[in-house]
C-alpha cells in the first residue's frame, strides 16, 4: 500500500491553541487529529503526522523546515498533505513553506487546501497543488475529501485533467491539451470572432494578465521644502529583525526610527543588516546605507537641498514576493506616509 | 475572382504500369515519377514510398508537404515558382484530396525539418498521419549545407513540387467528383446585404525571418522578406500563390499543403454572406528588425482601415521573435478600431511555466492557442523508419538533441524517441486544424 504523511499545526495536531503556537516541530508515527480523516479517505496509509506550531514556522522558518526535512529523510512516503488551512493566514503560509520544501527535497506530490482569502494561496500556488477550501474547520470534511480525491487520482496513476476541471488554484503552468471534442482551431477562431463582433462574451484561450501600471507622478518643483521618506525592498532591518520579515516571499514590512541617526550603523555594530535572501548581503551588511542611503540624505538635509528626511524608513524583502502581497504592503506603507505628510519617497530596490 | 477547386478523393495509392487515377485509386508509374524527380541534377538518390494512416512507419526528417494538383487550361500549379508567373485563384484547378506528397531527407535533416508517425500514439500529433502520402525520400549533392543546421532544402522541395504537378496530371482529363467554388465580388461592387454585414479580413504572417534568400516563404516566387504587407484575394492562397519556406521550427510551420488548403480561409468563406462580409487577405510577414515589424503593422492597420475592415483574424507562422509581429499587429488593428482574434501556438517551456508569448498586451484579448512548441513527447519505436532516425538527434532539428544530461539523446538505441513538439511536422496546425489548445495544470 502507498504511504502518506500529513502536516498539521498545533491546533489540528491536538497540542493546543494560540498559547502553544510556538510548539517546535515534531513527527509522530501515528495518525493524529485530522490525519485520521485522511487515512479513511485515502487509497494510502497515513504513516506519520508532522506537527508544528504556526508561530514557530512563521518566525523560525528555516529551522522548522530543516528539522522537518530531517525527520522525513528516513520516512518512505508517496504523497504529502498539509492542512487544510482554511482562512488561517499563518497556517496557510506554514503549509506552503513546508509543502514547497518537501516537494523540492523529495519530489513527491504535495497537496493542500486553503480559502481564497488565505495569503498562502497567492504565495505558494505555483509550488504545490492548493485546492479552494472553506473559511473554517466546519468545512474540514469537505476540504479533506477534495484533496484526498485528487491525491487518490495521482496515487492510482489516473490521467490528470487541467486545473479548471480538477479544481485546484491555477498555477500559471500551461501545457498543450487535446480537446475532448477535437474542435479544430478554425472553428474556435470563427466562433470567438463572431462573439466578439456581436458583443457577446467570449473566453480567450490565452488570457493576458492585466498590467497594473502606475502613472509617473509629476516632478517636485521645490525639493528644499519637501519631506522625503526612504522605502526599500532590500531587506534592511535592525539586526534582531523585530518584525520577523521573511527573507523571501515576504508578507510583512517594518518601520524603523532614524530620527536620531546621521547614518545607519552596520551589522558589526549590532545596528542594521539585510535579511534579503536574493542577493549577496556582504556589501549591505558592511554598510546598510548603500541600500537605505540615510547618510546621503542627511547631507542633503544639511545643505538645504531637501526639506527633511522622514523620521522612519520602511523596509520589506522583494525577492519571490508576489505582486499581490507587494501591492498590499505598498498601499499600507503609502497610507502611513500620507498620514505623516511625507511628500516624496525614494524607493530603493536591490 | 472565381476559383473552382475540383476534388478527386483518393481512397488508395499503389504503384503500377501507368500513372492514372481510376475509381478513387491513384496508380503511380514509379520509374516515370522518379524521372521527374531526377530532372534536377542535384538530386543524387531518390525513392518513392507509399504510407497510409495506421502504418507503423516513422518519417524523419520531413521537409515539405504538397497537395498534388493540375491547373486546367495550362500553367504551373505554383506560378512564379514551378513555371511562369501567372494569375492564381481564377478558373479551375483539380486536386487530389486526402493525400499529399511528403518530402523526406534520406540522410540529412535540419532545424526546420520535422517528424511524422503514421500510426500509433504519435499519429495524433500531425495532420499528415490522417492522409495517404506519397513519400519522396531523397538525397542531394548540396554539400554546402549538409552539415548546416539551417538548410534551404531547395533541390528536395522543388522536386516535391514537380512530383505533385506530375501526379496532378493524372486527373487532367477527368471530371471531378465535386467542386468547391470560391468567389468574392469586387469590394466596391458588393450588394447592400453584404455591405451591411461586418467586414472581416484575415491577416497572414508567413515566415520571412531570414535575410538571405532561399529560406523564406515565397509569394508568387517573391521572397516574403522583401515585401511590404499587401492585399491578396483568398483564392490566390488556395491556388498556389504561396509556397512554404525552410526555416521555422517545424511544429510552427505552414507547409505548402497548408497554404493550399488553409482551413481558416475556407471557414471564413463559409460564413461569407451569412454572418460576415469576407473582405480578403492582408498578407504581411515576420521580418526580424523592430522597424520592419512596426512598418508591417502600420501597413496592415492602414490597409484594414482603408478597406473598412471591422474585424480580423491574425495568424503567425512561428513563435519567439515573430510574437512581436503577432502581438504588434493585433494591437495596431485594435487601436485602429478593428476587432481581432489571434491564432498561434505558445512557448511555455517543458515545465509549462514560461511566459507563453515573447510579448503580451491586454489588447490581444481574444487568442486561440494551438499548442506548446516545447512540450516533451516520448514515443515508442516504430516498425519502420523512412529517412534517417538519427537525423532527429544529430542534425539540430529544433525539437531534437544529441545529448542531454538528464534525458540522454533524442534517439534511443531501441528506436524509441524523446523530443520537443518543436520537431513535430506542422504539429501545431496553426493554419487551423489544431485539435489542441493550452490549459492551466
Image (cartoon, rainbow, N blue to C red):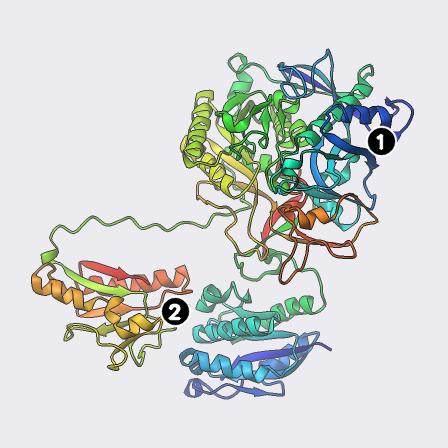
Q: Residues within 10 Å of mark 1 (few under 14, many from 20)?
A: some
Which of B288/A48 is in front? B288
Which of B284/B226 is in front? B226
Q: Residue furthest right?
A: B17
Mark 1 sits on what residue?
B11
Which of A26/A10 is in front? A26
Whole-percent x, y for residue B249 in the image: 60, 42
Tags 2 and 1 both on a single chain: no
Q: Chain of mark 1?
A: B
- State how far apart marks 2 and 1 are (Cα): 65 Å
Whole-percent x, y for residue B308 in the image: 46, 22
Q: Is residue A326 above or below residue B125?
A: below
Q: Chain of mark 2?
A: A
Mark 2 sits on what residue?
A250
Which of A335/A56 is in front? A56
Quadrant placement of the N terminus of chain B: top right
**Residues marked 2 and 1 touching at CB (< 8 Å):** no
SS for callout 2: loop
Residue A310 visible to the viewer: no
Residue displayed at 64% across by 26% down: B270
Whole-percent x, y for residue B233 in the image: 58, 20
Q: Is residue A29 above or below residue B75?
A: below
Amino acid at each position: 500500500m502507498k504511504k502518506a504523511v500529513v502536516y498539521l499545526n498545533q491546533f489540528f495536531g491536538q497540542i493546543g491553541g494560540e498559547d502553544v503556537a510556538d510548539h517546535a516541530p515534531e513527527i509522530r508515527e501515528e495518525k493524529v487529529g485530522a490525519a485520521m480523516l485522511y487515512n479513511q479517505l485515502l487509497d494510502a496509509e497515513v504513516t506519520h503526522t508532522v506537527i508544528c506550531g504556526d508561530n514557530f514556522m512563521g518566525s523560525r522558518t528555516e529551522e522548522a523546515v530543516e528539522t522537518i526535512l530531517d525527520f522525513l529523510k528516513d520516512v518512505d512516503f508517496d504523497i504529502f498533505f498539509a492542512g487544510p488551512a482554511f482562512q488561517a493566514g499563518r497556517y496557510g503560509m506554514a503549509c506552503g513553506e513546508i509543502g514547497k520544501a518537501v516537494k523540492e527535497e523529495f519530489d513527491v506530490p504535495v497537496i493542500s487546501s486553503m480559502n481564497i482569502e488565505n495569503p498562502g494561496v497567492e504565495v505558494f500556488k505555483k509550488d504545490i497543488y492548493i485546492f479552494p477550501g472553506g473559511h473554517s474547520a466546519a468545512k474540514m470534511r469537505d476540504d479533506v475529501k477534495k484533496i484526498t480525491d485528487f491525491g487518490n487520482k495521482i496515487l492510482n496513476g489516473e490521467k490528470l485533467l487541467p486545473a479548471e476541471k480538477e479544481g485546484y488554484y491555477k498555477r500559471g503552468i500551461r501545457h498543450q491539451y487535446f480537446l475532448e471534442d477535437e474542435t479544430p482551431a478554425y472553428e474556435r477562431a470563427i466562433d470567438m470572432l463572431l462573439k466578439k463582433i456581436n458583443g457577446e462574451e467570449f473566453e480567450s484561450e490565452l488570457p493576458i494578465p492585466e498590467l497594473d501600471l502606475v502613472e509617473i507622478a509629476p516632478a517636485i518643483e521645490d525639493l528644499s521644502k519637501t519631506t522625503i521618506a526612504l522605502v526599500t525592498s532590500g531587506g534592511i532591518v535592525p539586526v534582531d529583525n523585530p518584525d520577523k520579515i521573511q527573507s523571501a516571499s515576504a508578507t510583512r514590512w517594518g518601520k524603523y526610527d532614524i530620527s536620531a541617526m546621521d547614518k545607519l550603523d552596520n551589522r558589526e555594530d549590532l545596528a542594521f543588516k539585510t535579511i534579503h535572501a536574493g542577493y549577496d548581503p556582504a556589501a549591505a551588511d558592511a554598510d546598510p546605507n548603500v541600500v537605505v542611503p540615510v547618510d546621503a540624505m542627511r547631507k542633503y538635509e544639511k545643505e538645504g537641498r531637501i526639506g527633511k528626511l522622514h523620521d522612519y524608513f520602511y523596509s520589506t524583502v522583494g525577492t519571490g514576493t508576489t505582486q499581490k502581497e507587494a501591492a498590499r504592503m505598498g498601499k499600507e506603507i503609502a497610507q502611513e506616509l500620507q498620514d505623516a505628510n511625507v511628500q516624496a519617497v525614494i524607493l530603493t530596490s536591490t | 475572382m472565381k476559383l473552382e477547386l475540383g476534388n478527386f478523393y483518393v481512397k488508395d495509392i499503389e504503384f503500377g504500369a501507368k500513372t492514372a487515377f481510376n475509381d478513387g485509386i491513384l496508380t503511380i508509374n514509379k520509374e516515370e515519377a522518379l524521372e521527374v524527380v531526377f530532372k534536377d541534377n542535384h538530386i543524387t538518390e531518390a525513392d518513392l514510398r507509399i504510407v497510409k494512416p495506421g502504418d507503423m512507419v516513422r518519417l524523419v526528417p520531413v521537409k515539405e508537404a504538397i497537395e498534388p494538383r493540375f491547373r486546367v487550361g495550362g500553367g504551373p500549379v505554383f506560378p512564379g515558382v514551378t513555371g511562369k508567373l501567372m494569375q492564381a485563384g481564377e478558373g479551375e484547378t483539380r486536386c487530389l484530396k486526402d493525400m499529399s506528397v511528403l518530402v523526406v531527407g534520406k540522410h540529412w535533416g535540419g532545424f526546420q525539418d520535422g517528424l511524422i508517425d503514421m500510426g500509433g500514439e504519435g499519429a495524433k500529433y500531425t495532420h499528415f498521419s490522417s492522409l495517404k502520402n506519397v513519400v519522396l525520400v531523397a538525397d542531394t549533392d548540396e554539400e554546402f549545407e549538409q552539415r548546416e543546421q539551417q538548410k534551404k532544402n531547395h533541390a528536395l522541395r522543388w522536386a516535391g513540387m514537380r512530383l505533385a504537378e506530375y501526379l496532378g496530371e493524372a486527373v487532367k482529363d477527368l471530371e471531378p467528383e465535386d467542386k468547391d467554388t470560391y468567389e468574392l465580388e469586387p469590394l466596391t461592387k458588393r450588394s447592400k446585404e453584404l455591405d451591411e454585414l461586418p467586414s472581416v479580413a484575415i491577416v497572414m504572417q508567413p515566415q520571412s525571418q531570414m535575410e538571405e534568400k532561399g529560406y523564406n516563404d515565397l509569394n508568387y516566387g517573391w521572397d516574403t522578406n522583401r515585401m511590404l504587407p499587401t492585399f491578396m484575394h483568398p483564392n490566390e492562397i488556395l491556388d498556389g500563390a504561396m509556397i512554404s519556406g525552410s526555416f521555422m521550427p517545424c511544429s510552427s510551420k505552414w507547409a505548402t499543403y497548408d497554404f493550399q488548403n488553409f482551413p481558416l480561409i475556407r471557414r471564413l468563406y463559409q460564413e461569407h454572406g451569412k454572418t460576415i462580409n469576407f473582405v480578403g487577405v492582408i498578407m504581411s510577414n515576420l521580418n526580424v528588425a523592430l522597424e520592419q515589424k512596426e512598418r508591417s503593422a502600420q501597413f496592415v492597420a492602414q490597409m484594414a482601415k482603408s478597406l473598412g475592415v471591422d474585424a480580423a483574424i491574425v495568424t503567425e507562422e512561428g513563435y519567439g521573435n515573430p510574437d512581436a509581429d503577432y502581438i504588434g499587429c493585433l494591437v495596431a488593428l485594435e487601436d485602429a478600431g478593428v476587432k481581432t482574434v489571434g491564432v498561434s501556438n505558445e512557448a511555455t517551456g517543458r515545465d509549462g511555466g514560461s511566459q507563453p508569448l515573447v510579448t503580451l498586451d491586454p489588447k490581444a484579448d481574444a487568442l486561440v492557442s494551438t499548442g506548446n512548441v516545447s512540450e516533451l513527447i516520448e514515443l515508442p519505436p516504430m516498425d519502420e523508419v523512412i529517412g534517417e532516425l538519427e537525423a532527429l538527434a544529430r542534425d539540430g532539428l529544433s525539437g531534437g538533441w544529441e545529448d542531454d544530461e538528464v534525458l540522454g539523446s533524442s534517439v534511443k538505441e531501441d528506436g524509441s524517441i524523446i523530443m520537443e513538439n518543436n520537431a513535430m511536422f506542422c504539429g501545431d496546425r496553426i493554419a487551423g486544424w489544431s485539435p489542441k489548445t493550452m490549459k492551466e495544470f
